[in-house]
Image (spheres, rainbow, N blue to C red):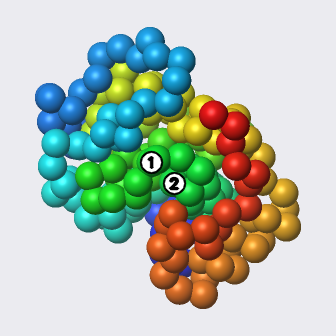
Amino acid sequence: LQHTLTPTPSPAGSPTPLSAHPSAQQESCASASPLDRNEWCGARVPAITMEAYLERISRHVKPSPVCFVAAAVYIDTACQATDLAFCSLAAHRLVLVSILLAAKMYDDSVFSNAFYAKVGGISLPQLNCLERDLLQRLDGRLRLSHEALQYALAVLAQGEVVLGSRALRLLPPPRL
């Protein structure tokens, strides 16, 4: 866990794009209501492990450590409050989008959504749709108190946490 909370140095150059399955790319996001949970799912489980994916995000995007803690809370809250599932087909996208939202909330400078999409291996329109959907699922509640972040970090540091199990449920349920 400590490894995923500490950004790693980035080598020169931009990230090598991860290939996104064409059928999983969504080009428009006109709906004001939450996306169907299947919109979060890829056509297949990504070949990259979650550990390698987190290292990739950390290396290229360099989010602050608090972003990883807040992202875990966002995922846990959204999965508990809505029909969203933290499953192998959706996990990578949930992690990417939750780190993006946390970076926008807690970091002073943030890379563009286009850069996050390239790092994450999904299209920009798809990332934008997923970002909007997660923000709606969280009812726009991204700011966590210092105490809530400390609590979440303590829970995460104790060992493996099953996201969606209410272990990190620190935000009030969204109104949908």
**Residue 108 in which image quadrant:** top right
**Kind of element beneath mark 1:** loop
Q: Residue furthest bottom?
A: 158
Task: Give the spatial CA distance, label 1 vs label 2.
Answer: 5 Å
Asked if residue 18 lies left or right of residue 15, the reply is left
Contact, mark 1 vs mark 2 (Cβ under 8 Å): yes
Q: Residues within 10 Å of mark 2 (few under 14, many from 20)?
A: many
Q: Residue at x 15, y 36 (%)?
A: 21
Quick one: label 1 or label 2, which is nearer the N terminus? 2
Q: Which residue is drawn at 44% across and 25% down?
A: 129
Residue 171 position within the rendered picture, expressed as x and y whole percent measured from the top left: 74, 54
Relative to the observer, which residue lies in front, 38 or 24?
38
Residue 14 position within the rendered picture, expressed as x and y whole percent measured from the top left: 33, 39
The residue tagged 1 is: 84
Residue 116 position within the rendered picture, expressed as x and y whole percent measured from the top left: 42, 36
Q: Which residue is drawn at 53% across and 46% down?
A: 82
| Residue 99 visible in the picture | no
Asked if residue 9 lies left or right of residue 11, the reply is right
Residue 79 image label? 2
Q: Residue at x 52, y 24 (%)?
A: 33
Q: Given the image, on which type of amino acid does mark 2 rest?
A: Cys
Q: How crowded is mark 1: few (under 14 residues within 10 Å), some or many (20 or more)?
A: many
**Kind of element beneath mark 2:** helix
Relative to the observer, which residue lies in front, 138 or 52?
138
Relative to the observer, which residue lies in front, 104 or 134?
134
**Residue 174 in which image quadrant:** top right
Asked if residue 100 lies left or right of residue 108, the reply is left
Q: Given the image, on which type of amino acid does mark 1 rest?
A: Leu
Question: Which quadrant of the rendered structure holds the C terminus?
Answer: top right
Above/below status of 97 relative to 111: below
| Residue 152 visible in the picture | yes
